[in-house]
Image (spheres, rainbow, N blue to C red):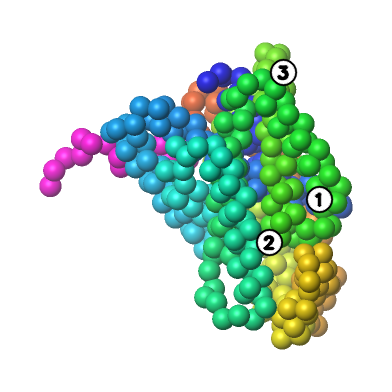
């Protein structure tokens, strides 16, 4: 495993974090939203699959106790990430936290690292189709239990698919020279088209439709492949040190971002009415879709004959309602994303500086080091008897 390729993964991870920061705080321009809504979090999940595959590479080859210990550490990592995601979701309500779905990748997919590549490819294709089919079945009015597998900002079944796709990419980028080049070029083509045609998957990102998954696959493959390519020259690798440092400390930066971004998103400091921003961002889903006739929505969905009609009905019924907010709300009270541009730029700048300084003295960020200590401590065979 070459250091250059690891540098590329670190760079891609940094871009994913910056993309999520942009989605929450960046300027309210169409092209910014097309790039930052949904794609960065999917890229983060794909990179989790890459990391999982890398962590298991040696143990998968040797098997035995080493593989068992590695899988044990992976499970502990997943539990900690899920718990951390739950904590972050409980202390603020304005940002949908992706860590629980990332943790599910580590909890569920550890054994998949030994699968044959064709089975991984099949999993990356079948999982989102199953999720989409169940969601379509559910929205037609068929009684089904509510489940985070299918619902929420980061439906787990889709994020597991992204994790499996990350394993496929890890193998592709370590294959014969022509395969990484082909995967990168194809990913850039699909990703570029995805950004251009972002309206097809909904403005909110994380869409539950085939196009969103395919576009996210392509976007992630293109970004990761490009990052691996541009970090080959030593001069570029050195110049990108601040970004690479941010990527190494991705968990620390993400947690800090969620905690600090909640301040401006909740209206502190206020950019208008003292409580209007917090009220607007704190609306429940019932308030957000207060004007939607869901009985009629189910009938309209049931009458659709293809995915184009399905997405058109979904966009016309739900997204305008989400954009307008609850009935009777004052649209002028909603804070524009432009209000947070200074906070966004400051957050990125501070993260780049602090991560660069920290990495000059420590190989890992504080949360990364704590996570590593906990996983190794919890899986050591030398625990004292009680």
User: Is 118 on the left-hand or right-hand side of 40?
Assistant: left
Task: Name the front one of labels 3 and 1.
Answer: 1
User: Is 64 on the left-hand or right-hand side of 144?
Assistant: left
- Which quarter of the figure has residue 243? top right
Q: What residue is drawn where x is 66% and y is 70%?
A: 136
Callout 3: helix, strand or loop?
A: helix
Choose between 139 and 358: the one closer to the eye. 139
Q: What residue is drawn where x is 80% and y is 83%?
A: 328
Q: What label sits on residue 208 in the rendered view?
A: 2
CB of mark 3 within 8 Å of CB of mark 1?
no
Circle nearer the N terminus (2, 1):
1
The residue segment tinted magenta is: 367-386
Please give the residue where the numbered disc 1 appears in the rendered image. Answer: 34
Q: Assess disc 2: are there few (<14), some (14-19) or many (≥20) residues with their C-alpha within 10 Å of its C-alpha.
A: many
- The x and y percentages for residue 275 are 71, 71
- The x and y percentages for residue 284 are 65, 74
- Which quarter of the figure has residue 241? top right
Callout 2: helix, strand or loop?
A: loop
Q: What residue is drawn where x is 66% and y is 75%?
A: 139
Please give the residue where the numbered disc 3 appears in the rendered image. Answer: 236
- Which quarter of the figure has residue 167? top right
Q: What residue is drawn where x is 72% and y is 25%?
A: 181
What's the CA distance linking mark 2 and mark 1?
Answer: 16 Å
- The x and y percentages for residue 65 are 28, 33
């Amino acid at each position: 495993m070459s250091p250059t390729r690891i540098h590329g993964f670190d760079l891609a991870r940094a871009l994913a974090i910056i993309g999520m920061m942009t989605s929450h705080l960046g300027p309210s321009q169409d092209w910014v939203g097309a790039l930052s809504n949904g794609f960065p979090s999917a890229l983060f999940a794909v990179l989790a699959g890459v990391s999982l595959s890398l962590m298991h590479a040696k143990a998968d080859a040797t098997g035995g106790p080493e593989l068992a210990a590695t899988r044990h550490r992976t499970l502990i990592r997943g539990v900690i990430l899920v718990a951390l995601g739950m904590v972050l979701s409980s202390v603020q309500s304005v940002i949908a936290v992706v860590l629980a779905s990332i943790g599910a990748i580590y909890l569920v997919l550890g054994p998949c690292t030994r699968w044959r590549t064709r089975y991984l490819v099949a999993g990356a294709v079948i999982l989102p189709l199953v999720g989409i089919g169940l969601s379509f079945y559910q929205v037609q009015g068929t009684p089904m239990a509510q489940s985070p597998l299918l619902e929420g900002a980061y439906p787990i079944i889709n994020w597991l698919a992204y994790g499996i796709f990350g394993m496929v990419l890890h193998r592709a980028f370590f294959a014969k020279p022509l395969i990484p080049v082909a995967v990168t070029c194809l990913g850039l083509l699909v990703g570029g088209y995805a950004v251009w045609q972002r309206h097809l998957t909904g403005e909110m990102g994380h869409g539950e439709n085939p196009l969103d998954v395919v576009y996210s696959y392509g976007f992630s493959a293109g970004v990761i492949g490009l990052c691996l390519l541009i970090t080959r020259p030593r001069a570029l690798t050195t110049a990108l040190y601040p970004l690479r440092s941010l990527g190494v400390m991705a968990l620390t930066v993400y947690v800090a971002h969620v905690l600090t971004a909640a301040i401006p998103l909740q209206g502190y400091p206020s950019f208008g009415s003292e409580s209007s921003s917090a009220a607007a961002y704190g609306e429940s889903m019932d308030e957000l879709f207060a004007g939607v006739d869901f009985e009629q929505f189910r009938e309209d969905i049931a009458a659709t004959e293809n995915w184009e009609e399905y997405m058109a009905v979904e966009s016309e019924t739900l997204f305008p309602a989400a954009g307008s907010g609850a009935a009777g709300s004052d649209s002028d009270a909603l804070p524009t994303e432009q209000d947070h541009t200074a906070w966004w730029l400051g957050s990125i700048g501070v993260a780049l500086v602090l991560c660069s300084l920290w990495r000059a003295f420590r190989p890992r960020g504080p949360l990364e080091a704590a996570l590593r200590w906990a996983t190794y401590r919890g899986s050591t065979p030398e625990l004292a008897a009680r």
